[in-house]
Amino acid sequence: MPATASSGAPSTDAPSGLARVTEPIRSRLQYTFNGQRTGTPEWVSDLEKGDDPGFFGPGSAVWAVHGGMSTIPAGVRALLVQALHPGALAGVHDHSRYREDPLGRLAGTIRWIFTVSYGSQEAATHASNWVLRLHEKVSGSYDDRHGVSHDYKANDPDLLAWVHMAFADSFLAAAMAWGDPIPGGPDAYVREWAKAGELMGVQDPPRSVAQMQAQLAAFDDAGILERSARTDDVVKFLRRPPLFPVLRAGYPVLFNGAVRTLSSRHRDLLGLRAPHLGPLDLPTRAPAGAMLAGIGALLGPEPVAAKHARLRRARLGIADPA
């Protein structure tokens, strides 16, 4: 999900023959993540604005986790985990246009993530309030596996908590599989990203990995999580999303990597198994890592969002490490 990893300008140092091969891939990657084939989206440039340093900065666990290519399989994993909660899934099924406009929905999610991660505190708060206002319209009802009807609202505390933890757990798991070392360790990321949960109305979000795992397990222990026909539809969609043909061939490698990072319990609930040959599991971590390294070579080592955040911080007189 590194939507802003490239400024959109093809490298002038690359041989013209190589550029002719890589540029179509790079432009389609950028369009997939932010809706633009070239250039920097205006909302990314706007991250330079603001009169405070933001909730996070260089050296934070959040910048480390959200600044790497591991965010791509992390996003897939988060959607799989979210789909285990029938209330969250009902909201997506009833109100989302993810089938008609999956890239638009992805771009909107990425915009929120990067604004909270790299924007000023004012921008992060504004973006979160905007999402919460959209959620006010998301309500309805669903029948659980026992045929019992439940009402839901997207801003219900338990749904907000589930979505927040599905995100945090997934981005952390992917970063630990394919990312660089996390400053302060995994607990630091969960503790820092709790601020995003608070902005989204989560009541007392977890502040350690142990707390997060205990709260995730509590949903399962309460009998809330389930696999339904809707769940299977989401899994089927995520297996083969409508990507550009040039990206389609490599996507299964990332999907399989995301599946492998799921807990065994969540894999079982989703009816998923990592690739295997008979009783033997096939490798997924190294192939996904190689794929992510290739994407990183095309998009650049640091999100452009981080560069604009650094410019804002420099304007405020904050001396950040190079």
Image (cartoon, rainbow, N blue to C red):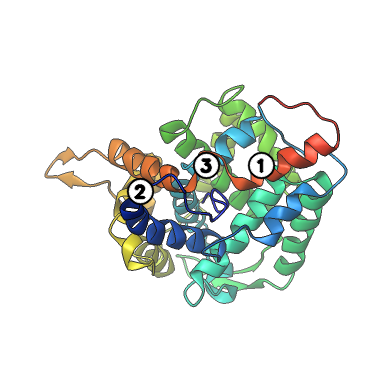
> Which of the marked residues, 3 or 1, is nearer the chain's N terminus?
3
What is the secondary structure assignment of the residue under circle 1? helix
The residue nearer to you, when weighing 124 against 299, is: 299
Name the residue at the bottom extreme.
100
Residue situated furthest left in the rendering: 278
Residue placed under numbered mark 3 in the picture: 171
Determine which of the numbered discs, if any, sits on residue 15 in the image: 2
The type of residue carrying mark 3 is: Phe
Q: Earlier in the sequence, mark 2 or mark 3?
A: 2
Query: How many residues crowd mark 1 within 10 Å: few (<14), some (14–19), many (20+)?
Result: some
Q: Is residue 143 visible?
A: no
Residue 306 as seen in the image, left or right of residue 243: right
What secondary structure is marked by label 3?
helix
User: Residue 221 vs residue 295: left or right?
Assistant: right
The residue that label 1 is drawn on is 307
Question: What residue sits 42% from the left and 42% below the top?
Answer: 297
Question: Which residue is nearer to you in this view: 165 or 294?
Answer: 294
Image coords of residue 113 (percent x, y): 64, 50
Quadrant housing the C terminus: top right
* Nearest the eye: 90 or 105: 105
On the question of residue 192 being in view, the answer is yes
